[in-house]
Image (cartoon, rainbow, N blue to C red):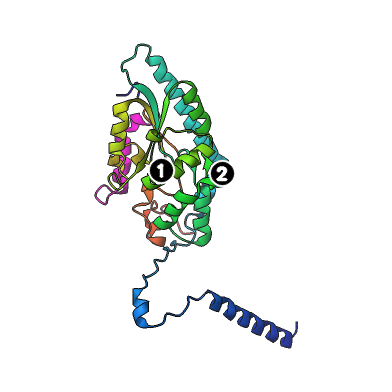
Amino acid sequence: MKLCNRVSTPWICGFLCGVCVSGAAWITDRLPAPVANAQEAAKKPAMQATPKESPLFRGLDANLFMQTSAEYRACCLQAFNLADRVVIDCLKLANQPVSDKRSAVVFDLDETVLDNGRFQTKQIRDGVAFDAGRWTNWEQNGGSELDVIPGAKPFIQKLASLGIERVYITNRNETCHAQTLEALERLGISVPPDQLLCASEATGTNKTKRRESVEARFQVLLYIGDNLRDFDEVFRYNEQTGIDGRKKLVDKRSEKFGRDWIILPNSAYGEWLKPLGRGEADANQLLPNVARLSEP
């Protein structure tokens, strides 16, 4: 229940020959050792190449916006300032307790509390699209490379000072639960292990059951995320709903934004990319060209 609502010719010839020889040696050094026979080759699993991004660097400006623009920083600070006001207003309305449950604010983690900008940078510089294997490696070993989203830590600290619980529902994998806790601790954000709810084979990326479990334990004042699915699974993209359908779903719940739900900007990745990924054909989703009144 709510309390409130990413030279000379010979010299040149000699130089080029040297480049060719050294280049050939460099390639040879990096070629896999020859397999003894075809039978042995058949036993080796096929290498799964990381998919290349198409068009190349399509996420460059998206990530530059998040990593370099003062506007992005301002949006994040604005979101957490609003969250602060919502919580204070909720506490003022709760002069007479309506529940014996402890109050809590529920956060997503990635791009809500945790800044994965260095992971996004690596993808762009390698010219690759998102790859689950790379992301798992990042979850396991990238904790020391994480930063905090602007405004998140002071808000979390204020909640702690007010005695309000902080619960994190994330789609980081349950197998990396300990590493995620360690990363948060390094950043100065202490989390009780049972208040970090990761994704598992049983839950998948659907957060509904986890939200329900939190609401059974706590009086949730506010949800904060960067993806609409952090708030309600109804926002999951499917071909029947389409792009316009998701926008209409947002409009139907417009009163919740800034009251029950606060969303941070994420131009790098998210549910909004699901209908895209078609290379330059994605330009077809842009608005029609302005009508030309006359020839130039």
> As drawn, which residue projects farthest toward the left?
240
Give the residue drawn at x 50%, y 76%.
31
Figure check: 39 above or below 122: below
Residue 136 place in picture, x, y as percent? 42, 53
Q: Mark 2 to mark 1: distance in Å?
A: 32 Å
Q: Earlier in the sequence, mark 2 or mark 1?
A: 2
Residue 293 seen in this snapshot: no
**Residue 211's quadrant in the figure?**
top left
Question: Could you tell whether 16 is left or right of 188 in the image?
Answer: right
Rendered location of residue 257, percent (x, y): 37, 31
Crowdedness near tag 2: few (<14), some (14–19) or many (≥20) residues, C-alpha within 10 Å: few
On-image quarter of the N terminus: top left
In this view, 23 is above or below 187: below
What is the crowding at mark 1: few (fewer than 14 residues within 10 Å), some, or many (at least 20)? some
Tag 2 secondary structure: loop
Whether residues under marks 2 and 1 lie with C-beta atoms below 8 angstroms apart, the answer is no
Q: Which residue is mark 1?
A: 177
Determine if the magenta segment contains residue 154.
Answer: no
**Residue 63: x percent and y percent?**
51, 50
Q: Which residue is pictured at 36% across the width and 28% down the height?
A: 260
Q: Amino acid at mark 1?
A: His
Residue placed furthest toward the bottom: 10
Segment colored magenta: 236-259
- Looking at the image, the residue that sits furthest to the right is 7
Secondary structure at badge 1 equals helix
**What residue is pinned by disc 2?**
69
Identity of the amino acid at label 2? Ser
Q: Of residues 123 and 69, which is closer to you in this image?
A: 123
